């Protein structure tokens, strides 16, 4: 799709960003000491902190990735929502109050509270850096995605812009500004998402069989010329797909470029021929859409938005739309309708170019609303044990990862006591749970709204808003952008704390004054921010929810076993904690880097050559870290807390 910025969107965006930066400078004067910079002096009210929890957690993965996955595949995207929310049960009943009692500024403080161990500080500090960087990648990818339709800038400009703004926020005021930014954007995100859902329900479903027509032909075998005659179309004579038995190129009536059609032979001797879309990448890097240079001017081509209802239930026969629907009626009608989803296939051409064809997939609503349709979750209903293990491993990582994320854990230090930590967690769970219910409506609404970008599922929710109202699109996109700002701010703050407080001061023994420690943390924030910018550009083509799954797996493997055993097993030793963190961190990281998904989508290597049986490591690496801690602790001065 070609994104054209609107003046309204630009104005609203810069108002949000300007206010955010202004707030950071205003609050900067309150964060001169390390206690103020890293933990806001522990004076954040519990309700504000609870909404800030939601702001931290409702990241680009939640708003962009989950909605996009639901819009592209259906219910499977909601499984991420369930996993994310379930993880807060661990945070509420296991982590909240002990974290507040044990720590001061960072995750390493809590692990090392009983030991004063440089080994623990080093392992926990490095773990914080790795988890934060992996979590930063999808946030930066999401930032670039948002900037494209909002301001019309390339993806890399969006990543650079959010990096610069976030570094400014963190450097100016630390946790004080980060908390208030998270509170504001968390509140606004939930409120305006609810407004968008109300608009989706008011609009209901509309049938659209004109945008991408299809025809049923009495032809039982692939005959290019017979199909062309039956459709009264002229074949492209120099078609490079002449030997392909499924796709055809027809000259457009105006003679400008061509249309692509896909032919599917049906049982009973008929054929369904439906319009598709194509992107051709030439050897020199040029992009053609339908045979024309990419662009929105005369003589240029661009992909059209997709997502529609093909057939409504029987009670709507003769009607093109349902009218307003209730919250439960929405699912009932969709369950009995037929939706057009989109698949894709890449074809290699004789001249060295490649063509990616996007084709229609009429799908029953009941299939959309069942799990197992996304390729990543197909194992739920298959006989393959690897597919089932991959799904269980992902759910385990999401469940255990929430209470292990560094930028979530350090938020417990911003309230005054353990009771406030518990209350803020409850507020966070309520806000987050309500929002995740909304994502199901947003994703399914985008699936059927006719506004989807077939090349980028991450844009589903903002484009749904644009289809409703230009002003709502501007507000939703600006809020989503500040969502990224807030989450990235928290991650960079956690990383800078790990460098200044844990590694340089705690491990290397450097002595800093209050002001010097804050200054070093700010320098570290700039460096981590720069790394995040580079990685956000490199990983631009992956779904942000999938990328977040990596961070959750590493966090759950490296951090949670050590934290849980420290709290509930008296024989835990410092050596056991260090070994557990190291084994969990590097085993999960190594598994991810050797997985089939990484081979295919990052390295560009045949995924079948991956040495690991499934892509999600949690079901192996979490128990491995736990066993490591138990074994090493039993081998090192049983029953007594020791130092290293």
Image (cartoon, rainbow, N blue to C red):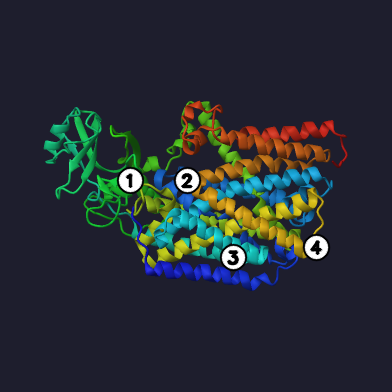
- Residues packed near mark 3 inside 10 Å, few (<14), some (14 to 19) or many (20 plus): many
| Residue 200 located left or right of residue 262 | right
State the CA–CA distance, disc 1 to disc 3: 41 Å
Residue 181 shows which numbered tag? Answer: 3
Q: Which residue is mark 2?
A: 543
First along the sequence among labels 1 and 2? 1
Q: Are marks 4 and 3 in contact (CB under 8 Å)?
A: no
Residue at 63%, 41% in the rendered image: 554
| Residue 289 located left or right of residue 529 | left
Give 59 or 441, whichever is nearer the viewer: 59
Q: Which residue is mark 4?
A: 513
Badge 4 element: loop
Q: Are marks 1 and 3 in contact (CB under 8 Å)?
A: no
Q: Position of residue 505 (x, y in %)?
A: 79, 53
Front: mark 4 or 3: 4
| Residue 355 located left or right of residue 238 | right
Q: Which residue is mark 1?
A: 286
Which quadrant does the C terminus fall into? top right
In the image, residue 525 above or below residue 70? below
Residue at 22%, 44% in the rendered image: 259
User: Which residue extends farthest front?
Assistant: 284
Q: Position of residue 355 (x, y in %)?
A: 31, 39
Residue at 66%, 63% in the rendered image: 174
Q: Are marks 1 and 2 in contact (CB under 8 Å)?
A: no
First along the sequence among labels 2 and 4? 4
| Residue 238 located left or right of residue 559 | left
């Amino acid at each position: 799709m070609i994104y054209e910025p609107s003046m309204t969107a630009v104005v609203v965006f810069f108002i949000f960003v300007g206010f955010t930066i202004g707030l950071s400078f205003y609050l900067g004067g309150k964060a001169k000491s390390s206690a103020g910079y890293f933990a806001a002096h522990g004076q954040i009210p519990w309700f504000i902190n609870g909404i800030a929890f939601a702001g931290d957690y409702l990241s680009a993965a939640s708003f962009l990735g989950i909605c996009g996955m639901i819009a592209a595949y259906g219910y499977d995207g909601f499984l991420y929502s369930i996993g994310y929310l379930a993880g807060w049960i661990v945070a509420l009943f296991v982590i909240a109050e002990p974290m507040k009692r044990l720590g001061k500024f960072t995750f390493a403080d809590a692990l090392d509270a009983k030991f004063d161990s440089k080994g623990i500080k080093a392992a926990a500090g490095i773990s914080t850096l790795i988890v934060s960087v992996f979590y930063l990648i999808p946030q930066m990818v999401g930032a670039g995605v948002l900037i494209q339709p909002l301001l019309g800038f390339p993806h890399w400009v969006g990543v650079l812009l959010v990096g610069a703004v976030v570094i400014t926020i963190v450097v100016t005021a630390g946790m004080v500004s980060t908390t208030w930014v998270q509170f504001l954007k968390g509140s606004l995100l939930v409120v305006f998402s609810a407004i968008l859902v109300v608009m989706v329900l008011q609009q209901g479903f509309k049938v659209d069989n004109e945008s991408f027509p299809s025809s049923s032909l009495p032809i039982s075998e692939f005959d290019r010329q017979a199909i062309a005659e039956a459709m009264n179309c002229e074949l492209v004579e120099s078609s490079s797909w002449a030997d392909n038995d499924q796709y055809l190129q027809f000259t457009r009536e105006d003679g400008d470029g061509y249309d692509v059609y896909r032919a599917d032979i049906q049982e009973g001797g008929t054929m369904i021929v439906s319009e598709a879309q194509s992107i051709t990448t030439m050897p020199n890097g040029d992009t053609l859409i339908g045979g024309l240079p990419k662009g929105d001017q005369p003589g240029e081509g661009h992909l059209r938005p997709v997502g529609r209802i093909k057939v409504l239930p029987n009670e709507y026969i003769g009607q093109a739309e349902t009218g307003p629907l209730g919250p439960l009626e929405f699912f009932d009608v969709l369950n009995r309708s037929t939706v057009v989803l989109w698949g894709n296939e890449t074809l290699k051409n004789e001249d060295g170019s490649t063509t990616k064809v996007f084709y229609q997939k009429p799908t029953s609503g009941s299939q959309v609303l069942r799990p197992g349709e996304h390729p990543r979750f197909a194992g739920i209903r298959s006989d393959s044990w690897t597919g089932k293990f991959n799904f269980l491993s992902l759910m385990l990582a999401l469940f255990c990862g929430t209470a292990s994320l560094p930028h979530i854990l350090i938020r417990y230090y911003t309230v005054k006591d353990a009771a406030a930590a518990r209350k803020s967690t409850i507020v966070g769970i309520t806000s987050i749970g309500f929002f995740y219910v909304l994502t199901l409506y947003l994703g399914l609404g985008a699936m059927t709204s006719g506004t989807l970008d077939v090349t980028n599922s991450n844009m589903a929710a903002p484009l749904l808003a644009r289809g409703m109202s230009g002003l709502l699109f501007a507000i939703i996109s600006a809020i989503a952008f500040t969502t990224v700002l807030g989450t990235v701010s928290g991650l960079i703050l956690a990383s800078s704390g790990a460098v200044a407080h844990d590694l340089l001061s705690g491990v290397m023994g450097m002595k800093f004054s209050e002001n010097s420690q804050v200054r070093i943390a700010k320098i570290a924030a700039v460096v981590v921010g720069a790394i995040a910018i580079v990685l956000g550009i490199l990983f631009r083509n992956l779904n942000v929810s999938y990328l977040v799954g990596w961070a959750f797996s590493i966090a759950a493997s490296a951090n949670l076993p050590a934290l849980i055993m420290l709290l509930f097993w008296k024989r835990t030793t410092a050596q056991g904690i260090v070994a557990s963190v190291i084994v969990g961190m590097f085993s999960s990281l190594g598994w991810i880097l050797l997985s089939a998904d990484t081979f295919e989508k990052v390295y560009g290597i045949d995924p079948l050559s991956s040495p690991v049986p499934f892509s999600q490591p949690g079901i192996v690496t979490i128990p491995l870290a736990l066993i490591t801690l138990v074994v090493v602790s039993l081998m090192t001065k049983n029953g007594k807390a020791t130092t290293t």
